[in-house]
């Protein structure tokens, strides 16, 4: 337990022959309860290693959000509510919104509800409707990550603890999934400067300033096409008149095989201004 740089209490485990046949080790519950309980993210102890000169950095909402897990019970019918661990509510309950946005890894976003009286989040039935599923019994675990503002990202894992990647995109519609209203979007016509080896920003036209104003000075958007997705950094220029796409553009451009004259159309749904579906209108003059 010293290899992590933290000095923790230790426990002893006498290895039996049957233990050598397994790929797991059960940790005593008394030991676990000192640092994390009820499937909430653990709090690391403030005791530091003798060679360290400061306390370990506290895990906060600023470090990618605060998380908890919930295991799926295949013997129980689908319930709509999730009850977060007490430690999660103690840390995040005061800032947790009544109408949180729930985001899935295919970019689809929908509204859940949170009751301050019961401390429960209602979202699972809508989640199944969005995914076109009758229930969640084929999955093993759900990971909830709250960003501290209003978004809850839900990751789903199978029995091998591999994350399940759901098909579709923020605006896609199929026979089983729920339809979403397309709220806004923007277009970019590929210019020669966008094709440079080192591209220092792709401007988004001021025509779309209302949408761009929904983003922070430096922000990120998720873009989906088929089974592929990209995370692009968007940043306001110093004059605040334009927003540009910076980090992630070159990979995005190469993966889609863009050429000069192609038009990229980005579309997002209501209340989901950071998740976009992209479609490309090719410039066939390049083929002449």
Image (tube, rainbow, N blue to C red):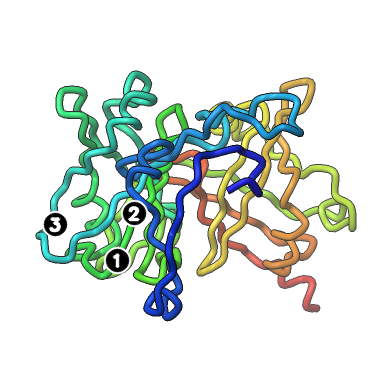
Residue sitting at 20 percent across and 35 percent down? 120
To which residue does mark 1 refer? 139
Residue sitting at 38 percent across and 45 percent down? 144
Q: Which mark is residue 78?
A: 3
Residue sitting at 80 percent across and 78 percent down? 288
Q: Is residue 176 left or right of residue 118?
A: right
The span from disc 2 to disc 3 (Cα, nearest Å) is: 14 Å
Assess disc 2: are there few (<14), some (14-19) or many (≥20) residues with their C-alpha within 10 Å of its C-alpha. Answer: some
Residue 219 place in picture, x, y as percent: 63, 35
Furthest residue in direction right, as rendered? 197
Residue 218 place in picture, x, y as percent: 67, 31
Assess disc 1: are there few (<14), some (14-19) or many (≥20) residues with their C-alpha within 10 Å of its C-alpha. Answer: some
Assess disc 3: are there few (<14), some (14-19) or many (≥20) residues with their C-alpha within 10 Å of its C-alpha. Answer: some
Between residue 43 and residue 61, name the one nearer to us.
Answer: 43
Circles 2 and 1: CB distance less than 8 Å? yes
Q: Is residue 203 left or right of residue 86?
A: right
């Amino acid at each position: 337990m010293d290899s992590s740089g933290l000095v923790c209490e230790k426990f002893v485990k006498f290895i039996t022959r049957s233990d050598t046949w397994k790929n797991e080790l059960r940790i005593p519950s008394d030991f676990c309860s000192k640092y994390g309980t009820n499937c909430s993210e653990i709090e690391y102890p403030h005791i530091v290693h003798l060679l360290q000169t400061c306390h370990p950095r506290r895990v906060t909402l600023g470090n990618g959000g605060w998380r908890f897990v919930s295991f799926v019970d295949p013997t129980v019918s689908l319930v709509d509510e999730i009850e977060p661990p007490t430690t999660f509510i103690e840390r995040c309950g005061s800032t947790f919104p009544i109408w949180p946005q729930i985001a899935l890894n295919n970019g689809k976003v929908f509204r859940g509800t949170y009751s301050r009286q019961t401390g429960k989040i209602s979202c699972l039935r809508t989640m199944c409707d969005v995914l076109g599923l009758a229930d969640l019994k084929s999955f093993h675990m759900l990971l909830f990550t709250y960003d501290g503002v209003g978004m809850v990202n839900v990751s789903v894992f199978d029995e091998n603890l591999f994350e399940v990647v759901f098909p579709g995109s923020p605006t896609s519609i199929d026979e089983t999934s729920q339809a979403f209203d397309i709220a806004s979007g923007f277009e970019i016509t590929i210019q020669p400067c966008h094709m440079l080896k080192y591209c220092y920003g792709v401007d988004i036209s001021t025509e779309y300033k209302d949408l761009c104003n929904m983003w922070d000075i430096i922000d990120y958007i998720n873009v989906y096409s088929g089974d592929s997705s990209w995370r692009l950094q968007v940043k306001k220029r110093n004059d605040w008149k334009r927003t540009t796409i910076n980090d992630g553009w070159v990979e995005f451009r190469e993966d889609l095989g863009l050429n000069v004259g192609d038009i990229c159309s980005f579309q997002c749904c209501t209340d989901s201004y950071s998740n976009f579906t992209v479609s490309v209108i090719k410039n066939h003059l390049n083929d002449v």
